[in-house]
Image (cartoon, helix red, strand yellow):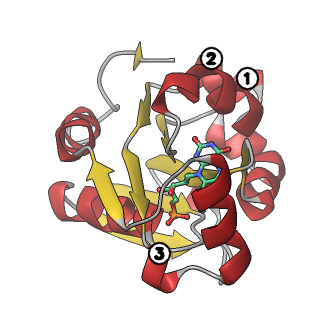
Amino acid sequence: MKTLIAYGTRYGAAAECAAALKERLPGDVDVIHLAEGSAEASEYDQVIVGGSIYMGQIQSHVKKFVQGQQEALLSRPLGLFLCCGRTDAFAEQFQNAFPESMRQHARRAECFGYAYSLERMKFLDRWILKVVAKVARSERSLDFGAIGSMAAQFSSQGGGTHDSTA
Ligand SMILES: Cc1cc2nc3c(=O)[nH]c(=O)nc-3n(C[C@H](O)[C@H](O)[C@H](O)COP(=O)(O)O)c2cc1C
């Protein structure tokens, strides 16, 4: 079984989630950071796409990838994930991030939590986080349970049953 995990990230949280998914999946798993490369979804048996949210939006290269590969994504098992600090706004942010057709088709949609890596952040991002979200030190709350559940669902041929949390 061949799996593609394609993701966007700014400071590495979504990359860590993608790597954790890969570790838990059997078979050949390719992990692509969409800011640095792309892949043909049609060459894989199943695909998981994710990214992180900034000011309500997922990375534009994730949107572009999803739009450009709609046909292939809609014809194989699909998983979607977000890293986002506002877990209470997951449903709304998930709706903004992925088109309805993908959301409907996804076997699983998950929020994998968040990480604030202040030491890696550009000044402006650190400032926004401090002023708007009142976060002044690094913290992380990645949901490895949710990552494990998604991996388990994509470990059997066909991607298992539909189970969207959004
Ligand atoms: C400047 C800034 C803006 C953010 N905006 C949002 C937001 O609108 N909604 C949200 O849920 N999380 C927001 N976050 C939190 C990020 O989504 C979270 O830190 C995520 O884990 C980042 O993942 P990444 O390291 O893969 O980019 C923001 C973080 C920063 C630094």
The residue under the point 44% across, 18% down is 164
The residue under the point 80% across, 59% down is 60
Residue 80, given in percent of the width and then of the height, sits at 51, 39
Q: Quadrant of ligand 1?
A: bottom right
Disc 3 or disc 2, which is closer to the eye?
3
Distance from Cα at disc 3 to Cα at disc 2: 35 Å
Q: Image quarter for residue 20?
A: bottom left
Residue 39 visible somewhere in the drawing: no
Q: In the image, what residue type sits under mark 2?
A: Gln
Classify 10 Å Cα crowding around label 2: few (below 14), some (14-19), many (20 and above).
some
Q: Are marks 1 and 2 in contact (CB under 8 Å)?
A: yes
Q: Which residue is mark 3?
A: 118
Q: In the image, what residue type sits under mark 3?
A: Leu
Residue 55, given in percent of the width and then of the height, sits at 74, 48
Q: Which residue is mark 2?
A: 104
Q: Are marks 3 and 2 in contact (CB under 8 Å)?
A: no
- How many labels sit on residues? 3
